[in-house]
Amino acid sequence: MSFTISTETPLSDDVRALVKELNEFTFELTPAEFRHHMTVEQMAQPDLTLFVARDADGTTLGMGALKRHANGVGEVKRMFVKPVARGLGVGGAILARIEELARQEGLCRVVLETGSNFDAAKRVYERGGFETCEPVLDYPPSAWTAFYAKSLSA
């Protein structure tokens, strides 16, 4: 299956549906107090760039975003690949686009928080060169969370 990745607004109906699918997926795996979701309105802020993968027919396959923080830190947010597209390289391609943009903008580090039981996601991050680390930003540590970071310095 071929796919393209482009920057998009999170406010479109099909991206809203993709966010809803991601939220439903995490609801089954993570207790509410350990979910760190962003609404599509929060995702539409200027400090965030959303990448959306689509198949040749324009159907959404996945998404991921770069959120900018102080001190040259970028954060991977809202990474999700629909079950039908898993194993096709969609997640890795989105992650690569996020990293490419972070490098272009001169960010020195990219970090993320994910579910400790999201094994497929953790494999994507590790294949992308991310390493486990201590808690990042203001996320509290818990048995339900895993943290990753990647230095973008030369």
Image: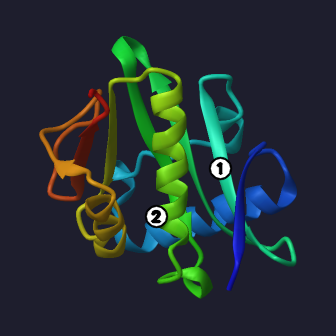
Along the horizontal axis of the image, is 71 left or right of 65?
A: left
Image coordinates for residue 11, horizontal then vertical, percent: 81, 45
Q: Amino acid at mark 1?
A: Phe
Closest to the observer, 107 or 28: 107
Q: Residue at x 53, y 62 (%)?
A: 93
Residue sticking out furthest to the top: 71
Q: How many residues crowd around disc 2 within 10 Å: few (fewer than 14), some, or many (20 or more)?
A: some
- Who's the residue at 49% across and 25% down the image? 68
Q: Where 98 sits versus 48, above or below?
A: below
Report which residue position mark 1 lands on.
51
Task: Residue 53 in the image: state x and y as whole percent.
Answer: 68, 63
Instruction: Give whichever of 134, 21 is nearer the camera.
Output: 134
Label 2 residue SS: helix
Q: In which quadrant is the C terminus drawn?
A: top left
Q: Secondary structure at mark 1?
A: strand
Query: Which percent across, then down, holds residue 81?
Result: 55, 70
- From this viewpoint, which residue is outermost toward the front? 154
Horizontal side of 88 relative to 51 (left or right) equals left
Where's residue 70, x and y in %?
A: 40, 13
Residue type, mark 2 in image:
Gly
- Res 40 quadrant in image: top right
Q: Quadrant of residue 133?
A: top left
72 to 124, vertically: above or below: above
Q: Is residue 97 above or below residue 87?
A: above
Residue beneath disc 2? 92
